[in-house]
Amino acid sequence: DDYLTKPYNAMELRSRIGAGERVVRLHEQLETANAALKRLVQTDFLTQVYNRSAIVHRIEEELSRTARTKAPLAVYLLDIDHFKQVNDNFGHAAGDQVLIEVARRLKEQCRNYDVTGRYGGEEFLILLPDTPLEGAVVLAEKLRHEVELVSVPGVDRAITASFGVASFPADTPDGDMLVRMADRALYAAKALGRN
């Protein structure tokens, strides 16, 4: 980025090296700030999982990878049952704590490369790369049980969730269609009695 002509002046060399070091430090600080900003833009502030726009973007990325590798991709859409009653009976702060705890448990039980996001108010979307439908159903049951273990001080009711599972390869490699399939399965689970 710079040069000196010979014979060089030692003071000028030190000065230019100092200026170069400052530029490098500023560049490192900018990269760190940009990474933090990217995390903020992609993360749901409450639950610290991906937000809706980030998880939808990740669906498209995973579908693209899946189409290339021919590996299966499973998607969960889950909804905390009767969540409005938690907010109404115990307050929004308690409801927030339920959301935080559910998100923590979901992330904890999923693999490092699975992707968890808050899709809406009390809805979460989970992407499971390299997971056939049968394996996804087994993990959904495990996650459903984990949600039942959620305990928040001041909330004296059981927390449950209903799950809808869809997988690709299916009829379409479209992310919207995959989420709609999971949504239909979620509504079927709720119609069958929830949890």
Image: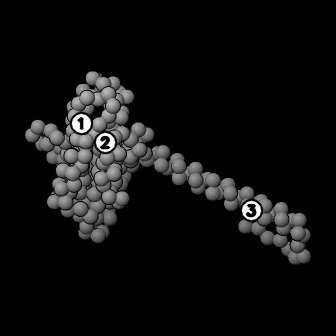
Camera-side residue of 110 and 180: 110
Q: In which quarter of the image is the N terminus?
A: bottom right
Q: Quadrant of residue 111?
A: bottom left
Gap in angstroms between the C-alphas marked 2 and 1? 9 Å
Residue at the far left in the pictured view: 192
The answer to whether 153 is drawn above or below residue 115 in the figure is above
Report the mark closest to the observer, 2 or 3: 2
Which residue is disc 1 drawn over? 159
Which residue is disc 3 drawn over? 20
**Mark 1: which secondary structure?**
loop
Camera-side residue of 140 and 28: 140
Mark 3 is on which residue type? Gly
**Mark 3: which secondary structure?**
helix
The answer to whether 63 is drawn above or below residue 181 in the figure is below
Give residue 185's position: percent from left, percent from top. Answer: 15, 46
Q: In which quarter of the image is residue 194?
A: top left
- Residue depicted at 19% across the width and 60% down the height: 135
Give residue 42's position: percent from left, percent from top. Answer: 43, 47
The mark that comes first in sequence, 3 or 1, is 3
Mark 2 is on which residue type? Val
Which residue is disc 2 drawn over? 102
Q: How crowded is mark 1: few (under 14 residues within 10 Å), some or many (20 or more)?
A: many
Residue 74 in the figure: left or right of residue 8: left
The disc label shown at residue 24, or none: none
Q: Do the residues labelled 2 and 1 touch (CB within 8 Å)?
A: yes
Report if residue 49 is visible in the image: yes
